[in-house]
Image (cartoon, helix red, strand yellow):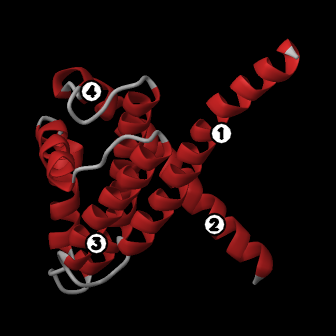
Amino acid sequence: MSDQTEEKKVNEVTLPKEKAEELIRKHTYGAMALGLVPVPFVDFVGVAAIQLNMVRKIAKTYEIPFSQEAFKNTVGALIGGAIPGLAGMPISSLMKTIPIVGQGLGALSMPVVAGASTYAIGKVFYRHFASGGSFLTFDVDKARDYYQEQFKKGETIVSEMIKKDKGDEAGTG
C-alpha cells in the first residue's frame, strides 16, 4: 500500500509541473506567432493577453485564485526593472512602422522578444506557484533576477525553436 501511496504522491507532484511546462511552451509559441503580426502594437497587446492567459492557466493548475489586476500589477513591477522585457516588445513593435527595413527588423526581433518574455513570465509564476506561493505572497524583488535569467534563457530557447521550425519546413518542402 505504501508504494501505491508514494507513487500517487509522485504523480500528483509531477502532473502540475508537466502541465505548467506544456502551458509555457504552447503560450511561448503563441507569443512568437503573434510577434509576426505586421501591425504595430497589435502584437504587443496580443502578447500581453497571451501572457495573462498563460499565468491564469498555471494558477489554475496549482489551484491558486487568479486576479487579473494582481497579475497586471505584479508583471508591471516585475519587468519594470528588466529592460529586455519592458522595452524590447514596444521597440520591436514600433520598428514595424518604418517602411521596408523596419518591418523586416520588427518581424525578426518581435517573435524572439515576445517568446522570451512569455517564457520568462511563465517560468517565474510556475516556480512561485509550485512552491506554494500566491499573488499575495509574490515578492517582485526576489523574482526580478530570476525573470532576467529566464528571459536570457528564453531568447536562446526561442531562437532554437525558430531554427528547428525552419529546419522542419526545409525538410518537408
Which mark is first along the chain, 1 or 3? 1
Say which residue appears at 44% left-offset and 44% top-offset: 154
Which mark is first along the chain, 2 or 4? 4
Q: In which quadrant of the rendered image does the N terminus lie?
A: top right
* Eye-nearest disc, 4 or 2: 4
* Eye-nearest disc, 4 or 1: 1
Say which residue appears at 22% left-offset and 76% top-offset: 102
Tell me, yes or no, whether the two marked residues, 3 and 1, touch with CB atoms within 8 Å.
Answer: no
Q: Considering only vertical position in the picture, is 131 above or below 123? A: above
Q: Which amino acid is tagged 1?
A: Leu
Residue bearing mark 1: 15
Residue bearing mark 2: 165
Circle 4: element type? helix
Circle 1: element type? helix
Q: Which amino acid is tagged 2?
A: Asp
In whole angstroms, how far apart are the C-alphas of marks 2 and 1? 27 Å
Q: Which amino acid is tagged 4?
A: Ala
Left/right placement of residue 42 relative to residue 170 reads: left
Residue bearing mark 3: 46
In whole angstroms, how far apart are the C-alphas of marks 3 and 2? 22 Å
| Residue 74, position as x, y percentages in the image | 17, 41
Residue bearing mark 4: 143
Which mark is first along the chain, 1 or 2? 1
